[in-house]
Image: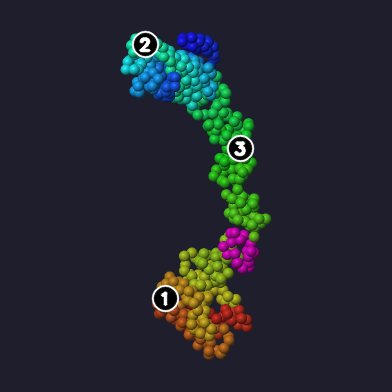
């Protein structure tokens, strides 16, 4: 019965003798629990065992093992009643030789066992020694766990006399379990699958893919390994930063080797060439373009705005705040009629274009006192060329047709006139009504008087002291324009203030 054991031991020695290789040896301690079945001569039962072991090198190791099994051996033929199971407890030493290297996906192994046992059978408790031989597979799952499949032939030597004669019993066991290895894999410190003896980068972080020399993969060969490379597809030869990304000197997101506009100011949006966006295609980048929606093909200035001047006043439309101004009227930089003295009345309507700053003016642009009115043709002037007559037209104050009723626009103008009078509390004025030459003299005189009174009454309603105003009608007697034209007639139909005190 010992020949199989001698044969297996010789085979194990042959395997271990050929185990001297250059591979790193995994000599960690491990624990290996297994469960399975025990059977002999058609009888079956359960089997469990646990081993604590250690490899001496990559192909040979030993285990300290304890096992327990129960074999149902009840038999009518041998008059063995039920309940007299063959209960087997063993504790012993296994010698294990592995037939494949550490890197194999499946590692067959052979095993030789020497044990002491305690057997309870037929109401007797027997002790003795035993041996076993077998084999199986280690199936690695990771660096710490293997699946263990094993079949074993066991011989139990009964050395005591009793009901059971001195004899040798055999049983087969088949188990499945696992093997857990303690500590780090001594053959691969960084766990990258490359043995330490071949690993040129022995400190590679766990989980990082490596080449056969153990160094991290760098597919774009930029010197930054892929697991650190934020730009893993950098073109060959492109200088990169510590993140593996091509240098981007202007920080616009386009690497220098592709950037056709490498000096773009920080924060400016760019296209795929690294050049500032020009959404309307006018040649002026958006960040400088004051007119970003210029139609295609339109000529533009340096600010990206169309070079057009709809009203012909010399101010481009995009700067012109008065785009429909009369081109014959001088305008300022904003395209609106000039107001040289800043009194709110444009020069072409201002009869006093040089009003001193701060003075409140009438609708014709003149202050009640301290101002210089441009003379009308034929008027007398002082030494400074200012009109001697202190009459001021209330421009825009009109009435309904053939009536003394003020129009709504006239009321709005008189609101400002009331404010002007309030600015000169010591000044009294004559409120003059004038008409054109249409109609009889008497009728026009009466109409002008009624209109002068209408203006006074309105201003009193706006808080002006009535005693400061003296209404007077002049009819058609004091024209300031030619009554033979419609334009002249319109100009003659007017209301004037004349300073009287």
- Residue 318 in the magenta stretch? The answer is yes
The percent position of residue 118, horizontal first and vertical second, equals 35, 15
| Side of 36 relative to 439 (left or right) | left
Position of the C terminus by quadrant? bottom left
Residues under labels 3 and 2: Cα distance?
93 Å
Instruction: Name the mark on residue 256.
Output: 3
- Secondary structure at numbered mark 3: loop
- Secondary structure at numbered mark 1: loop
What residue does disc 2 label? Answer: 165
What residue does disc 1 label? Answer: 462
- Residue 479 in the magenta stretch? The answer is no
Q: How crowded is mark 2: few (under 14 residues within 10 Å), some or many (20 or more)?
A: few
Identity of the residue furthest to the right in this view = 297
| Side of 281 relative to 7 (left or right) | right
Q: Is residue 154 above or below residue 294?
A: above
Whether tag 3 and tag 2 are in contact, CB under 8 A, the answer is no
The percent position of residue 290, horizontal first and vertical second, equals 58, 54
Q: In this view, does 339 lie above or below 489?
A: above
Task: Please state which of residues 84 and 87 is positioned toward the viewer in this rendering.
Answer: 84
The percent position of residue 429, horizontal first and vertical second, equals 45, 78
């Amino acid at each position: 019965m010992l020949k199989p054991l001698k044969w297996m031991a010789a085979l194990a020695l042959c395997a271990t003798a050929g185990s001297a290789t250059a591979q790193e040896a995994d000599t960690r301690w491990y624990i290996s629990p297994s469960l399975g079945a025990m059977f002999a001569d058609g009888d079956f039962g359960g089997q469990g065992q646990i081993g604590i072991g250690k490899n001496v090198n990559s192909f040979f190791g030993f285990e300290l093992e304890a096992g327990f099994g129960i074999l149902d051996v009840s038999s009518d033929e041998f008059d063995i009643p039920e309940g007299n199971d063959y209960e087997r407890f063993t504790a012993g030493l296994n010698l294990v030789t592995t037939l494949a290297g550490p890197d194999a996906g499946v590692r067959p192994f052979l095993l030789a066992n020497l044990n002491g046992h305690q057997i309870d059978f037929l109401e007797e408790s027997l002790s003795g020694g035993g041996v076993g031989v077998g084999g199986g597979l280690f199936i690695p799952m990771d660096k710490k766990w293997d699946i263990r499949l094993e079949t074993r032939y066991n011989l139990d030597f009964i050395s005591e006399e009793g009901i059971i004669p001195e004899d040798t019993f055999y049983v087969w066991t088949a188990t499945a379990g696992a093997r857990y290895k303690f500590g780090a894999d001594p053959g691969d410190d960084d766990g990258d699958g490359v043995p330490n003896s071949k690993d040129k980068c022995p400190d590679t972080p766990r989980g990082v893919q490596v080449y056969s020399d153990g160094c991290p993969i760098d597919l774009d060969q930029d010197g930054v390994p892929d697991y650190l490379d934020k730009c893993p597809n950098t073109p060959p030869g492109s200088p990169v930063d510590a993140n593996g990304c091509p240098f981007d000197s202007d920080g616009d997101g386009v690497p220098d080797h592709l950037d056709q506009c490498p000096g773009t100011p920080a924060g400016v949006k760019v296209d795929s060439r690294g050049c500032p966006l020009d959404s309307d295609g006018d040649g002026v980048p958006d960040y400088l373009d004051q007119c970003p929606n210029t139609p295609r093909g339109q000529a533009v200035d340096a600010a990206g705005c169309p070079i057009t001047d709809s009203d012909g006043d010399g101010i481009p439309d995009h700067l012109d705040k008065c785009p429909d101004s009369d081109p014959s009227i001088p305008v300022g930089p904003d395209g609106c009629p000039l107001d040289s003295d800043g009194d709110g009345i444009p020069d072409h309507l201002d009869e006093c274009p040089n009003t001193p700053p701060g003075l409140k003016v009438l609708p014709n642009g003149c202050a009640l006192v301290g101002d210089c009115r441009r003379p009308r043709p034929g008027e007398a002037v002082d030494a400074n060329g200012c009109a001697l007559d202190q009459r001021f037209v209330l421009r825009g104050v009109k009435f309904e047709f053939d009536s003394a009723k003020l129009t709504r626009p006239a009321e709005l103008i008189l609101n400002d006139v009331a404010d002007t009078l309030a600015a000169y509390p010591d000044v009294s004025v004559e409120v003059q009504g004038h008409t054109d030459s249409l109609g009889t003299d008497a009728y026009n005189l009466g109409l002008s008087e009624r209109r002068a009174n209408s203006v006074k009454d309105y201003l009193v309603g706006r808080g002006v002291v009535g005693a400061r105003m003296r209404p007077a009608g002049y009819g058609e007697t004091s024209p300031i324009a030619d009554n033979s034209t419609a334009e002249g007639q319109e100009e003659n139909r007017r209301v004037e203030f004349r300073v009287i005190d």
